[in-house]
């Protein structure tokens, strides 16, 4: 099978689920049309078989050997054609399913990367995970069912024409019976749609709850909150179970309707056809053909009911995808350029001189974090980089030149070396120096496979302090033009903190670095210290100078101690 196509680089400007499904169909129109062609031919071949079989029975009744051989050969040809078209229909169905599903994955992944820090502020983890877990399958199925659904409509029309040309009453019975049965299923679709949407929302909330519990399990055990959160998870899981049962009730009725309604039509057509045969209005061969047509119609009619179900699920899933794609980044970039230089936040007054290790101590830690976000262009602000405004630079350029490393960063699953050297360009000596500066060499040496060790999800095999040191090594190894570290030593012991402060200054010598911290050990190693209160600069100088000249600074960094 040929490879799947790449998704469009840009995110489509689509605001409704139906338009998203239509956009997906247009993107794979060639494969859809090919699949619909094979599916239609596959159904038509099956629709013609009862007529051929009826002619064969007529030949047997008339003892016409030549006609029997001819119709037998035609039946064999139809069987071979059905096998070929069935194989191709299935191949195209799988291709279209994969194309629609993974185009959705590509779009949402690229848009999530474009959103960056905006995404977790607007959507929970569970909602995003649900797209990759279940919604892509429903979107893929909605494309898949278009093949058989379209072909089944053509097959029903073909059978109706054949029946009308053979027997007008039977043809009209089928012509009006099929729409009536389709209309009988219609009232089930609206409540099914509503209940499926509710179930999707509850599933996303439960996934978020599970992720939160797993991430904070160590803390929950420490404070004895395991039973409380287990009870909350149980309550929410029961709500999801009841929602799932509600969906299953309607789906069970829908499945039953797929059997009962076609069965009624078969019984009526067969009964009337038998009556016509007894009265001599139609030959025996036609009666057999009518019965086979009635049985054959079960397939197309069940496919139409299945199409209604899958398109409804696809509509719900597309709505969740649209919710993600409709989110716009909080910050955007321009097309300007900057040679670098002084990085200044006008609101707070924080100014980073090129090649200087600057520490920012704030009376409220959130003030330092806010300043770091503005300097890193994660929130809007009046920030200049050299002679130009930071907002005029392309966002990709800002991310590559200014790195903000906070404690919200994660260690991902995979080889430790690849986790640290995210760009894959660092020499072994550079990796060693970064680990040395972050006091993380002992962590690597304790691992049986060293840098080749596989990191578990979120680095859960490491303690909080070990994760912090490894994240610091990763930030140092990236070696950006401007590095902004937010509380990089908050989870390590005093001895490690003192060594990190000394080595960090050497590792970043000649490079612009800002550290948000109130640790005296780190502040003492900074070339320049800025004290922030109420979001604005209150005092500047070295650590010792500020201890003597600023009582507010002294109270903050010594925590009220003499």
Image (cartoon, rainbow, N blue to C red):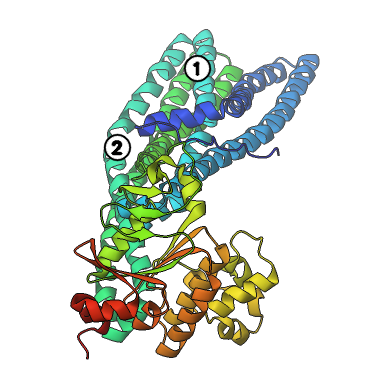
Quadrant that contains the N terminus: top right
Q: Residues within 10 Å of mark 2 (few under 14, many from 20)?
A: some
- Seen at 60% across and 81% down, the residue is 444
Q: Is residue 330 above or below residue 502?
A: above
Q: Where in the figure is residue 5, as x and y percent of width and height?
A: 62, 36
Q: Earlier in the sequence, mark 2 or mark 1?
A: 1
Residue 406 lies in what quarter of the image? bottom left
Give me the disc on residue 157. 1
Q: Is residue 6 above or below residue 62?
A: below
- Seen at 66% across and 64% down, the residue is 426
Label 2 sits on residue: 188
Q: Could you tell me if residue 241 is visible in this image?
A: no
Q: Where in the figure is residue 514, as x and y percent of width and height?
A: 41, 66
Pick the residue in front: 24 or 418. Answer: 418
Q: Residues within 10 Å of mark 1 (few under 14, many from 20)?
A: some
Q: Is residue 94 left or right of residue 26?
A: right
């Amino acid at each position: 099978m040929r490879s799947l196509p790449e998704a469009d680089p840009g995110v489509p400007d689509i605001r409704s689920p139906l338009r998203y499904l239509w956009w997906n169909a247009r993107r794979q129109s060639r494969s859809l049309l090919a699949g619909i062609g094979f599916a239609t031919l596959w159904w038509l071949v099956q629709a013609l078989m009862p007529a051929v079989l009826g002619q064969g029975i007529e030949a047997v009744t008339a003892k016409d050997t030549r006609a029997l051989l001819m119709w037998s050969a035609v039946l064999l040809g139809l069987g071979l054609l059905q096998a070929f078209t069935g194989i191709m229909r299935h191949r195209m169905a799988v291709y279209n399913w994969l194309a629609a599903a993974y185009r959705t994955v590509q779009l949402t992944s690229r848009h999530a990367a474009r959103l960056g820090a905006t995404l977790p502020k607007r959507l929970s983890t569970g909602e995003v995970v649900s797209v990759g877990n279940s919604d892509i399958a429903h979107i893929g199925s909605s494309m898949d069912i278009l093949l058989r659904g379209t072909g089944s409509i053509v097959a029903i029309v073909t059978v109706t024409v054949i029946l009308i040309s053979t027997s007008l009453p039977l043809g009209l019975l089928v012509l009006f019976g099929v729409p009536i049965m389709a209309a009988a299923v219609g009232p089930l679709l609206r409540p099914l749609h509503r209940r499926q949407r509710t179930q999707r929302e509850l599933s996303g909330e439960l996934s978020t709850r599970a992720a939160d519990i797993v991430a904070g399990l160590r803390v929950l055990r420490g404070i004895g909150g395991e039973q409380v959160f287990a009870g909350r998870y149980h309550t929410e899981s029961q709500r999801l179970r009841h929602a799932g049962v509600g969906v299953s009730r309607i789906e069970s009725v829908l499945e039953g309707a797929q059997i009962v309604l076609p069965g009624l039509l078969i019984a009526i057509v067969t009964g009337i056809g038998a009556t016509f045969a007894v009265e001599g209005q139609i030959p025996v061969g036609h009666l057999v053909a009518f019965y086979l047509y009635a049985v054959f119609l079960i397939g197309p009619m069940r496919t139409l009911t299945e199409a209604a179900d899958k398109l409804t699920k696809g509509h719900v899933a597309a709505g969740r995808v649209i919710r993600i794609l409709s989110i716009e980044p909080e910050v955007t970039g321009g097309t300007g350029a900057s040679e670098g230089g002084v990085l200044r936040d006008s609101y707070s007054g924080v100014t980073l001189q090129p090649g200087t290790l600057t520490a920012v101590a704030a009376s409220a830690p959130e003030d330092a974090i806010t300043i770091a976000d503005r300097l890193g262009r994660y929130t809007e602000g009046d920030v200049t980089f050299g002679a130009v405004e930071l907002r005029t630079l392309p966002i990709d350029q800002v991310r590559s030149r200014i790195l903000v490393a906070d404690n919200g960063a994660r260690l991902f699953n995979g080889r430790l070396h690849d986790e640290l050297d995210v760009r894959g360009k660092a020499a072994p000596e550079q990796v060693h120096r970064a680990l040395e500066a972050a006091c993380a060499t002992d962590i690597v040496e304790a691992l049986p496979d060293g840098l080749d060790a596989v990191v578990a999800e979120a680095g859960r095999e490491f303690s909080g302090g070990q994760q912090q040191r490894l994240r610091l090594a990763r930030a140092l190894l990236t070696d950006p033009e401007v590095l902004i570290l937010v509380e990089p030593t908050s989870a390590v012991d005093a001895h490690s903190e003192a060594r990190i402060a000394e080595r960090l200054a050497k590792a970043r010598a000649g490079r612009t670095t800002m550290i948000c911290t109130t640790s005296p050990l780190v502040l003492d190693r900074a070339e320049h210290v800025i004290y922030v209160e109420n979001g604005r600069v209150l005092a500047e100088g070295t650590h010792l100078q500020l201890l003597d000249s600023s009582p507010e600074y002294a109270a903050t960094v010594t925590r009220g101690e003499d």
